[in-house]
Amino acid sequence: MEAYQIPLFPLNTVLFPGMPLPLHIFEERYKEMINWCLATKRPFGVSLIRTGVAEGGPLPEPHSVGCTAQITQIQPLSQGRLFVMTVGHQRFRIRDLSHDRPYLMGEVEEYPLLPESVAMLRRPADQLYPLVVDYLDVLARLGQVEFDISQIPQDYQSLLYVAASIIQIPTEQKQNLLAAARASTILARLHSIYREQTALLRLMPPNDQEAFSLN
């Protein structure tokens, strides 16, 4: 797989292909990074922080598997800050890191899912869909989410990334999903996670917290 260079933005979040990621940019190093991306018409890479902190101080150490982020919208804010809307594009794996700039640069390679039979994936994907709907329905009844069922994709690759993104589990577990080599592995893990999390949610009383929307 051919390697290429992109800036890296280590964060305390896991970005999946096809998923939106809004960012508030206020550090000078990341303003410079965004300007580089705009000038070169290149994406940057988002990777979960392995060690270190996201803001201030030395550059953190990222996990080796991340997702490229395409910039779709920029809005200047006061005091030179930026609101940047991005969307996840493709998985990558970091080969090497460079600290020559104020932000990290990575030599990365594409990390696509290994080829598998679509026919083999259709059944577990079909089984995952109602698990996701059931989970969101329980969250809705608890007053924690609003969702439109038509927004949940049914094709296996879009579904597994949406399902991995919206489930409320620790980021390290999400990183393990992102880093999995096969769609079948991700689907199997999601089946188990959704059954477990939905069962736990059913034990919780409704609350009056303001719901967030998945639309």
Image: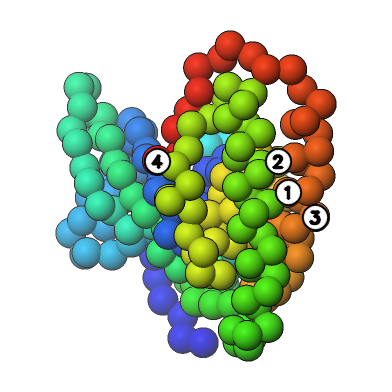
Residue 170 - label: 2
Inter-mark Cα distance, 3 to 4: 25 Å
Question: Mark 1 or mark 4: which comes first in sequence?
Answer: 1
Inter-mark Cα distance, 1 to 4: 20 Å
The amino acid sitting under disc 4 is Asn
Inter-mark Cα distance, 2 to 1: 13 Å
Given contact means CB atoms under 8 Å apart, are the residues at marks 3 and 2 in contact? no
Local crowd at mark 1 within 10 Å, few (<14), some, or many (≥20)? many
SS state under label 1: helix
Given contact means CB atoms under 8 Å apart, are the residues at marks 3 and 1 in contact? yes
Q: Position of residue 128 (x, y in %)?
A: 67, 60
Question: Mark 3 or mark 2: which comes first in sequence?
Answer: 2
In this rendering, the answer to whether 146 lies above or below 176 is above
Q: Position of residue 161 (x, y in %)?
A: 55, 59
Residue 192 - label: 3
As drawn, is 3 to the left or to the right of 139? Answer: left
- Going 55% across and 75% down the picture, which residue do you hit? 111
The amino acid sitting under disc 2 is Pro
Question: Mark 3 or mark 4: which comes first in sequence?
Answer: 3
Q: Nearer the viewer, residue 144 or 106?
A: 144
Given contact means CB atoms under 8 Å apart, are the residues at marks 4 and 2 in contact? no
Residue 215 - label: 4
Residue at label 1? 194
Q: Mark 3, mark 2: which one is toward the viewer?
A: 3
As drawn, is 125 to the left or to the right of 35? Answer: right
The amino acid sitting under disc 1 is Tyr
Q: Position of residue 165 (x, y in %)?
A: 56, 49
Local crowd at mark 2 within 10 Å, few (<14), some, or many (≥20)? few
